[in-house]
Image (cartoon, coloured by chain):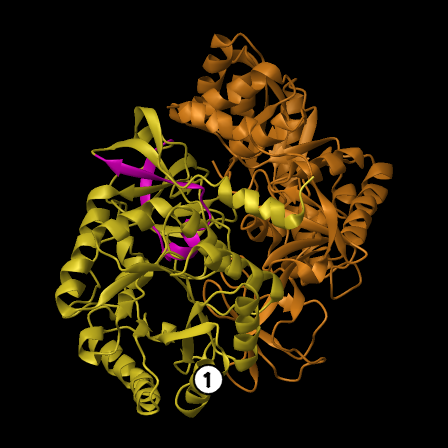
Chain colours: A orange, B yellow
Amino acid sequence: MPTLHQFIDESITGAVTEPVKLSEPVPVEQLPTPALIIDLNLFDQNLTKMHHFLDPRGIGLRCHTKMHKCPVIAHKQMAAGAVGVCTATVSEAEIMQVSGIADILITSAVVTPEKIDRVLKLARTNPKLQIVVDNIEVANRFNEAASESNLELGVLIDLDPGMGRTGIEAGGPALVLARHLANECNNLRFDGLQMYAGDCMHLEGFENRREKYTGVMEKGAETKSLLEEAGIEVAFFTGGGTGTFNIEPDVGLMTDLQAGSYAFMDIEYREIGGEGSDRFDTFEPSLFVLVTTISKPQQRLITVDAGFKSFASDKMVPEFRDVEGVIYHWGGDEHGIIQLTNPSKEISLGDKLAMLVPHCDPTVNLYDYYYPVRDGKVEELWPIAARGRSQ
Amino acid sequence: MPTLHQFIDESITGAVTEPVKLSEPVPVEQLPTPALIIDLNLFDQNLTKMHHFLDPRGIGLRCHTKMHKCPVIAHKQMAAGAVGVCTATVSEAEIMQVSGIADILITSAVVTPEKIDRVLKLARTNPKLQIVVDNIEVANRFNEAASESNLELGVLIDLDPGMGRTGIEAGGPALVLARHLANECNNLRFDGLQMYAGDCMHLEGFENRREKYTGVMEKGAETKSLLEEAGIEVAFFTGGGTGTFNIEPDVGLMTDLQAGSYAFMDIEYREIGGEGSDRFDTFEPSLFVLVTTISKPQQRLITVDAGFKSFASDKMVPEFRDVEGVIYHWGGDEHGIIQLTNPSKEISLGDKLAMLVPHCDPTVNLYDYYYPVRDGKVEELWPIAARGRSQ
């Protein structure tokens, strides 16, 4: 019988982090639905487009793997030129590290003894691991643990952009914490600042978004100057995301952009609008849920096999990729009811149809693997090895 | 390299369906959060209460495992007296069957060739497996497949209670389908009717719920009479749920109640009201998510490590089990922001707190295992072996 920690350790070392190759290609219309599918051509284009934009502007991509939770994709992003990855949780970091990625930043605060232990366990074999702190007492706990393990841990200060979610107040309080790290925490190495303005990512309208985001980030710039004037080097400044990727160069603050959704996109991001466009279409949706119509109880309705357990329901409803003039209504945990208002093509019982996802991150978290599709066929599965690893 | 079907088969036979016993008990406050915990005393009470009510009234409990997705719990329910289980999907049925349960009804329509194959594969070793159909063409497909496999498959007709989600129209259309099954489908055995009025389960106010549900079920009773007058035996009538468990005896139609939530309960069910009570409290919440406070960016706010990836967001927000005077706000995929309006107890950084779940089914689907708790300790894990099996 294992202890709880042995059980968790075995679930990490036993995780399948590489593609599962199939002996026979499967036509997409034979997949058991609901199935999470990736259009590989569009996915590849999205990765390329992001680097074409960021690389010449000297901004590194530290892609956020909380979005896809998949080491196969993280390795593709690193191969495409990413400087490293972010994870939201310790357990995501464990999966990324066991898959062979070292440049990992855990972007959310870790405060409890059992998780500090797990971070230190990772750091013992990975000197590149970085964490964020937003509190002196927690910094002391990490310093003590790092000292006991006789190692140095890279730390960024998380600044609150005014969202009131995580982060220390910019300016004076951040300087106090930075001084504390520099002077009192011998086993913590101050690497820089994180300021993620999550509430700006989905502001509608490019100019509106640019204006508000630029205003919010002024506090970040001031804090950086304050630290540098106090003789504290700020090697990294990280934050931002898909919604601000083309605003960051003008802000001029980010060394590492934490974009995630750019690889898959979703309806929520599409709707925010792009530069000179009602739709944010620099990156195209490459992620879909394949659903099947399973019942037709009434003339103008047809029911699909995907509800709250197949699409995250925190945002709008899903949309079909190739059918217009229909409306999806949530039909419970396992069902969606399609209202056939004025369908652009006939939908019959047993049809399989691709749907755009409202919000990619929590939708991905409902599936065990992706089916990557090229030329209508699936040749391998990509395990979502960090799915459910919210700890 | 496996084929896709070999890969899926291996995931079924490899599923852990028994409790994972730990070598050392873990105090609940040492669990890595977010953690899905069960209060075992309340859980046991809920199981007992349901049978104390149903058994003397001659209604069988065919518990719906789509709610908990856990063979360990399904076996406890069978041991407590359930007559069988329901599953919403073929892949849930595969997990329940591999765990050793035979009395399985798949409650949602199956229409595509690859899933019909999988149903037949289950039926080959399990003559008790039952499915539902709501369409003549699909019935023919099943009959043909059963004929090719040289076996008899138990079938119920799914009646639309007027929701427009699944099911054939009650009355005449159902009779046509029943006659077709009886006369044209030699390899299908007509076992009875299913009519699940999902839209009645959460009607607020007991009297309101009773009145509306009783009205809706009249169509079910008429259809049953119609079939019996035509000489077609209706051995089973199944449907209903936690919201109607104490209405069914007066309706007098159900042989098998499809309740699921009664074992765990959730905020959504609590709010519908019970018989003579504002709250539906016959069954008590036994399922909680343990969360940790990880950041305190502002005076009247504290942030917990659980958002859209730890609570299903299709309904209301989560609530604390033991703290009042605070409001949870969704803080994104990994965070909840607690507004400390007038907290009934102090909440500090690093505290672990239990939260009631808004809607149990899709919340459970976010986790890999339960931590059952008795006397503040966890001695084993219960794998949620059918989690993510929405296919």
Q: Position of residue A147 (x, y in %)?
A: 50, 9
Give left or right: position of A178 versus A377.
Answer: left
Give left or right: position of A144 versus A300.
Answer: left
For disc 1, the neighbor class at 10 Å (few under 14, some 14 to 19, many from 20) is: few
Residue nearer the viewer, B173 or A208: B173
From this view, report whether residue A96 is shown above or below residue A198: above
Residue B357 drawn in magenta: yes
**Viewport quadrant of the N terminus of chain A:** top left
Residue nearer the viewer, A59 or A33: A33
| Extreme residue in the front direction | B150
Please name the amino acid that badge 1 sits on.
Asn
Q: Position of residue A190 (x, y in %)?
A: 61, 20
Residue drawn at point x = 32 percent, y = 33 percent:
B380
Residue drawn at point x = 60 percent, y = 15 percent:
A125
From this view, report whether residue A266 is shown above or below residue A370: below
Magenta part of the chain: B350-374
Residue drawn at point x = 37 percent, y = 72 percent:
B198
From this view, report whether residue A264 is shown above or below residue B139: above
Residue A50 drawn in magenta: no
Count of labels shown? 1
Q: Position of residue A108 (x, y in %)?
A: 53, 35
**Quadrant hosting residue B256:** bottom left
Residue nearer the viewer, B115 or A8: B115
Q: Secondary structure at mark 1?
A: helix
From this view, report whether residue B215 is shown above or below residue A180: below
Q: Which residue is mark 1?
A: B183
Q: Position of residue B174 (x, y in %)?
A: 43, 86
The chain under label 1 reads: B
Q: Is residue A2 visible?
A: yes
Give left or right: position of A271 versus A90.
Answer: right
Q: Is residue A337 visible?
A: no
